[in-house]
Image: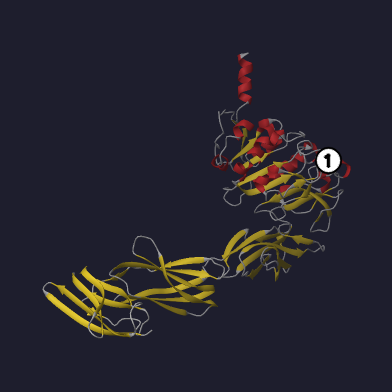
Amino acid sequence: MKHFLAILFVLSVCFSVNQTANAAFPPAPNSTSVLILSSTVSGGLGSQEANAITLAGFTPVLCSPADWALGTAGDFAGYRAVCLGDPTCVVGTSTIAAAVANATVWGSIVDGNVVIIGTDEDFHSGSGGTQLANSAMAFVLADDPGQTKTGAFISLSCYYHNAIAGTLVPLLDAVSIPGSMSVTGGAFLGGGCYNNAHIVATHPALAGLTDATLSNWSCSVHEAFDRWDSLNYQVLAIARDAAINYIAPDGSQGIPYILARGVRVLSDITLGPENDTNCIVGPDHQLTATVTSGGTPVVGATVTFTVISGPCAGVIGNAVTNGAGVATISYHCNTPGTDYIKATFVDALGNTQTSNIVRKTWKDCAGPVELSAFSYSISNKDVTLNWSTSSELNNSGFEIERSTGNNLWTKVGFVNGNGTTTNQSNYTFVDRNLNSGTYNYRLKQIDFNGNFEYFNLSSQVIIGIPSKIDLMQNYPNPFNPSTKIDFEIPDMGHVKLNVYDNTGKLVASLINDYRAAGYYTTEFNAVNLPSGIYFYKLEFNANGQNYTKVMKMSLIK
C-alpha cells in the first residue's frame, strides 16, 4: 500500500529529466529547459515531444495540470519554450484545460518562434509524424538569436474532432489575435478527413518532409483552419482535398493545417525588420528582403513590397536583389498607426513566393507644436511673456496660466495660434498690475480637436517692491462709470486715497489704512456721480516722511 501511494504521489507532481520531484510549479533547471504540460503528451519523458526536445539539445521538464495552474508569467518566462503536445488523439479539450484557463499568463511571455500543428502527429509517428515533431520543435528552439525568447510548440491533436465548422480555439488566443483562430472540426467535407497534404513554404519546421510523408493521414487531419491569424502566421502546409479558403504562393489551393510564426519563418523570401517604430515626422523606414533558392542567394530578382493593411495600405514599390540576394526599399507613412507589410517575388518556375509579414508602427512622437523659446521680462508690476514656435500642427492657440506657487493655476489670457505652419512664429502676452510676490507661468497649447499640451516657464517670476512713492494716471480716462487707480509705496506706512469734485468737496474715500510696501490697484466707481472733472489725492506717511500727490480725471456719461 505504501508503494502504491508513493507511485500516486510521483505521478501527481512535475518532473525534470533526472526525475526530481517538485511540490509546486517547477522552476526551470537551466536556460535551455522546455516545459511540457504532461496531460498533452503520450509517454511523459519518453514521449515523441520530449525526445524531440532532447534531440534539439534542450532539457524537457514535465508539469502536471495542477502545477501548471500555479505558474506566474515570471515562472513560464524561465523556460526556453512551452510545449502543448499530442496525447495520441484524445477527443475533447480536457487535457488542455489547464493551459486554456491561464492562457493569458503563459501566453504573455511567448515572443519567440511558434508552430501550430492541426493534426495528431504522434498517432502517425511511423509515417512522418516523428519527423514533423522533430523539425517543428527544432524550429521553435532555434537561435533567434541568443536563445532568450520563449517559443511555443502546439499540437491540436484530436481536441476538436466532431466539432462544427467555425469552432473557435480559445487556447490559441494566447499566441495570436484573440478570436482569430477557428477550425473545421469533423463537420467539414467527409468528417474532416484529408489525405492530400501539400507543403506550401520552404521552412525549417518541415525539414525532411514531403507531401507524400504528410499525406494519407486520413481523419487525423481534422483541425484544419477555416480562419487563422494571417497577420502573424504563415501557412506551411495545406489539405488540398478540402473546401478552398487559401491560395498558396505556388498557386495551390486548399485549407491550412500547419502554421508558424517567428524570425525564421520563410518561403524563399524573408522580410525584416520584424517589428519597428518610427515617428511620422522623421526619417524613412527601410525594408530588407532576402531571396534564396535552396540556400543560395537569388541575384537580380524583382521584389515587390506591399502594405497589406494599415494607414498607408498599398504597394510601396519594387527593388532588385543584389549579389547577396538582398533587396531594400524605403518608405514613409504620414498617418499614425501600424502597417502590416509583406514582400513577394516570382521564382524561376513562375510561382509567386510570399515573405513573412512584418509590422511597422508610425507614431506621432512630437506634440502638435515645437516650442523653441519661452522667456519673460518685468516692467514695474507688469510681466511680459515671449515665446516662439519652430513648427505648428493644427494649433488653435495658447491659454496663459499663472500660479503663486501653490500649484493652483488660473487662466489669465489666451493667444491665437497659427494653425499649421513650418515657419517660426513669435508670440507675446502681457500680464499687468501684479502685486509684489513670486509667480509661475505656463502655456496650455490647444489644438482644434481639443487636445492640449503644457509648456512651463523654466524660472519663477518675482515682482519686487517699488523703489519710490508714486501715483499713476487712472485708466481708462475719461471713464464711465468706473476706473482704476494705481500707486506704489517703498515702505510700510499709512495711506489715504480720496476723490474730490472740482469744488474741492470729498466725494469718495477709497483707502484710509496701513499698507505694506508694494504695488496697488484700487477701483473707483462713480455710478452715482454726475459727469465732470474730479481729482484723486494720495497721502502717504511713513518713517516721519509725508508724501502727497494729486491727479485729475474725467467722468463722461
**Dot 1: element:** loop
Q: Nearer the viewer, residue 367 or 220?
A: 367
Q: Nearer the viewer, residue 516 or 39?
A: 516
Specify the amino acid type for callout 1: Gly
Question: Which of the 4 quarters of the picture holds residue 136?
Answer: top right
The quadrant of the rendering that contains the C terminus is bottom left
Q: Is the residue 284 above or below the residue 108 in the image?
A: below
Q: Residue at x 75, y 38 (%)?
A: 157
Residue labelled with disc 1: 186
In the current view of this chain or complex, which residue is farthest to the left?
Answer: 544
Left or right: 88 in relation to 504: right
In the current view of this chain or complex, which residue is farthest to the top?
Answer: 1
Left or right: 251 in relation to 521: right
Left or right: 349 in relation to 444: right
The quadrant of the rendering that contains the N terminus is top right
Total residue callouts = 1
Q: Nearer the viewer, residue 392 or 244?
A: 392
Q: Is residue 88 visible?
A: yes
- Residue 166's x, y, as percent? 79, 46
- Residue 259's x, y, as percent? 73, 49
Q: Residues within 10 Å of mark 1 (few under 14, many from 20)?
A: many
Q: Is the residue 457 above or below the residue 246 in the image?
A: below
Question: Which of the 4 quarters of the picture holds residue 324?
Answer: bottom right
Left or right: 117 in relation to 64: right
- Residue 284's x, y, as percent? 60, 70
Q: Residue at x 44, y 77 (%)?
A: 388
- Residue 11's x, y, as percent? 64, 25
Q: Nearer the viewer, residue 406 or 426?
A: 406
Q: Is residue 208 visible?
A: no
Q: How is the image coloured?
A: secondary structure
